[in-house]
Image (cartoon, rainbow, N blue to C red):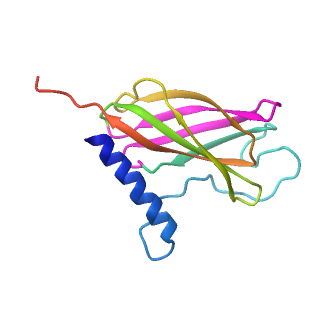
Amino acid sequence: MLRIYAIALASLAAVTMATGAGGVRAGSMTAPSTGTVSGDWDIDTDVPGTATHQAESVGADFFHVDWQSRADGRGQSRLTGYVYDDEGQPATDVEIQIVMLDAAGHEVESVLRPVRGLVPGKGRAYFDVSVPDAASYQVSVVSFALVEFGPG
């Protein structure tokens, strides 16, 4: 039941974001930019080829995501980070969407990756996924199932 709610919430947010001005919009899923930097340096860090971001998710009432990317030199990048459960009820079957953006901020590709295991209530779960190289990324939680406890 709660998984259906999460999928419906994600669908509603996607439709709302697509309708543009005048509708309710989800929070920003990108880190604020401080300008253009030449070379292979990300503007949010002093280490070449590495980016650290905090993104608001479609399930912003339940989760937030902290992550960083590192190019592996073979046309792929590793995104590592944590999904934080802000609600306090454990979640399973958490799935993140990773959107690859070009230098102009336009979507190039999008992939879904699972977060393995349980995300404890008021806790976090680690993820480490491989994705195609991109200028930048957006990471958000797009589906999950809250753990329901029976009568005790």
Does residue 69 appear left or right of residue 98 in this picture? right
Does residue 27 appear left or right of residue 132 in this picture? left
Where on the picture, by quarter, is residue 71? top right
In the image, residue 92 lies at what x, y percent?
A: 37, 30
Q: Does the magenta stretch include residue 73?
A: yes
Residue drawn at x 43%, y 72% as measured from the top left = 23
In the image, residue 2 lies at what x, y percent?
A: 28, 41
Residue drawn at x 50%, y 75% as measured from the top left = 21
Question: As displayed, is residue 40 above or below residue 71?
Answer: below
Q: Residue furthest left?
A: 151
Region rendered in magenta: 59-87
Q: Which residue lies furthest to the bottom in this view?
A: 22
In the image, residue 36 lies at what x, y percent?
A: 81, 58
Give the quadrant of the C terminus: top left
Q: Does the magenta stretch include residue 11?
A: no
* Front-most of residues 61 and 132: 132
Question: As displayed, is residue 13 above or below residue 93?
Answer: below
* Front-most of residues 60 and 100: 100
Residue drawn at x 35%, y 52% as measured from the top left = 8
Where on the picture, by quarter, is residue 129? top right
In this rendering, the count of numbered labels is 0
In the image, residue 50 lies at what x, y percent?
A: 74, 37
Give the quadrant of the N terminus: top left
Question: As displayed, is residue 9 above or below residue 40?
Answer: below
